[in-house]
Image (cartoon, grey):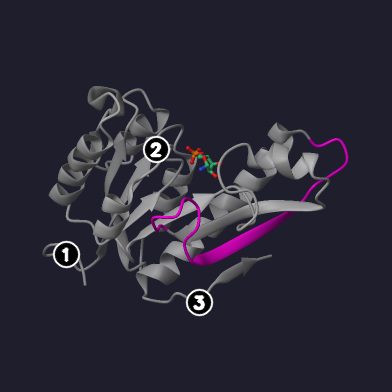
Amino acid sequence: MTGAGGAHKRVAILISGSGSNMVTLADSMTGDHPARPCLVLSNVPTAGGLDKARALGIPTAIVDHHDFKGDRAGFEAALNDALERAHPDIICLAGFMRILTEGFTARWSGRCLNIHPSLLPKYKGLHTHQRAIDAGDEEAGCSVHEVTAELDGGPILGQARVPIEAGDTADSLAARVLVQEHLLYPAVLRRFACEDRTPLFLP
Ligand code: GRF
């Protein structure tokens, strides 16, 4: 299925911050890639990724969760309105820092991806790198998974592994993992856009 009238599948990307994953996803959707970015949406009006999206010529939208003061359903209704106006075939969460309810995940079931900075199912939630270091793990990494009602719990579509080195801090490890995120997410999106859900493992 492609977006309204387009030859390509339409990909909406949701961000909350710098949007480095969004940029690598957008940059990857060229040439014979079956998808193109159709929207970059942020819940944070000042997110650095919005300016990057504008510079790339990608339509942007803002749905500020502060406008809904804890009314999660109201926020998600506004989120869905903004998304449906862009007619996405696929939604990529890329540093999107809001927890989504089952109402949202059911609406986009089978069409929503997320990247999480751990080797799921280990370390769901936050502070993943510090937790891996504190546990004495030999490696960390990132995972791309389908978004379901379970936080960071959907089917895994790809993983990249990164060794934890002596003296690593959460920041130094995060920087190395981010490099792998930028390789993994575009590769998984391309497979997903080709209706291929074969999990991808790097290296
Ligand atoms: C990445 O580390 C990602 O794993 C996590 O949030 C960060 C997003 O960074 N979900 P960016 O906004 O894509 O630069």
* Among numbered discs 2 and 1, the one appearing first in the sequence: 1
Give the labeled residue for mark 2.
Answer: 98
Left or right: 59 in relation to 122: left
Q: How far across and how far down the image is residue 20, in percent?
A: 48, 40
Examine the residues drawn in magenta and state their main secondary structure.
loop
Residue 154 highlighted magenta (yes or no): yes
Please report the residue visible at 54 percent of the width from the left and 49 percent of the height from the top.
116
- Which span of residues is magenta-colored? 147-168
Residue at disc 1, CB closer than 8 Å to ligand 1 = no
Please report the residue visible at 80 percent of the width from the left and 50 percent of the height from the top.
137
Please report the residue visible at 47 percent of the width from the left and 61 percent of the height from the top.
154
Q: CA distance from mark 2 to mark 1?
A: 30 Å
Give the labeled residue for mark 3.
Answer: 198
Between disc 3 and disc 2, the foreground one is 2
Residue at disc 2, CB closer than 8 Å to ligand 1 = no
| Label 1 secondary element | loop
* Among numbered discs 1 and 3, the one appearing first in the sequence: 1
Give the labeled residue for mark 1.
Answer: 6
Query: At label 3, which amino acid type do we have?
Result: Thr
Q: Residues within 10 Å of mark 3 (few under 14, many from 20)?
A: few
Q: Is residue 4 above or below residue 63?
A: below
- Tell which of 191 and 142 is nearer to you: 142
| Label 3 secondary element | loop
| Label 2 secondary element | loop
Residue 127 highlighted magenta (yes or no): no
Please report the residue visible at 20 percent of the width from the left and 46 percent of the height from the top.
80
Left or right: 169 in relation to 194: right
Residues at badges 1 and 3 in contact (C-beta under 8 Å)?
A: no
